[in-house]
Image (cartoon, helix red, strand yellow):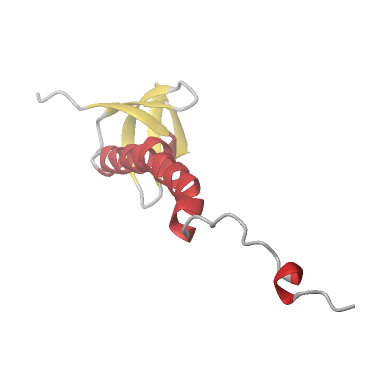
Amino acid sequence: MEIPIFLAQAAPGPEQPPVLFQFMPLIIIAVLFYFLLIRPQQRKQKEHEKLVSGVKTGDKVVTAGGIHGIVANVKETTFLLKVADNVKIEIDKNSITTVSKAEAA
């Protein structure tokens, strides 16, 4: 007994959507992450770098640890900060959070 060929063939399944539509949710999530998380953080980092690069001797600053002082000396990667009479500390440039410019005399 011979089985007819047309019965042995598999029925065609549902068509698969194009590959672009399969990856669309991942692409949308990546774009959202870029615009909601990465881009604002890069902008904030550039503003902080600009703030720190503009600090000069005599400016009043506040560090990330909450220390208030006046910049006594600017070095390549650090500041010498005067926090009281005869008390100076050396801090990293990245620890500066706010700057008040020195008043013109």
The spot of residue 21 in percent (x, y) is 45, 52
The quarter of the rendered structure image containing the C terminus is top left
Position of residue 2 relative to residue 47, above or below, is below
Position of residue 75 relative to residue 48, above or below, is below
Name of the residue lying farthest toward the front: 1
Q: Quadrant of residue 80?
A: top left
Name of the residue lying farthest toward the right: 1
Q: Nearer the viewer, residue 103 or 26?
A: 26
Can see residue 41?
Answer: yes
Can see residue 93?
Answer: no
The spot of residue 4 in percent (x, y) is 76, 74
At horizontal 46% and vertical 27% (from top left) the residue drawn is 64
At horizontal 36% and vertical 43% (from top left) the residue drawn is 42
Position of residue 43 relative to residue 100, above or below, is below
Q: Quadrant of residue 57?
A: top left
The spot of residue 96 in percent (x, y) is 39, 33
At horizontal 45% and vertical 49% (from top left) the residue drawn is 24
Position of residue 33 relative to residue 87, above or below, is below
Name of the residue lying farthest toward the left: 105
The spot of residue 49 in percent (x, y) is 32, 43
Name of the residue lying farthest toward the bottom: 2
Relative to residue 65, is residue 85 drawn left or right?
A: left
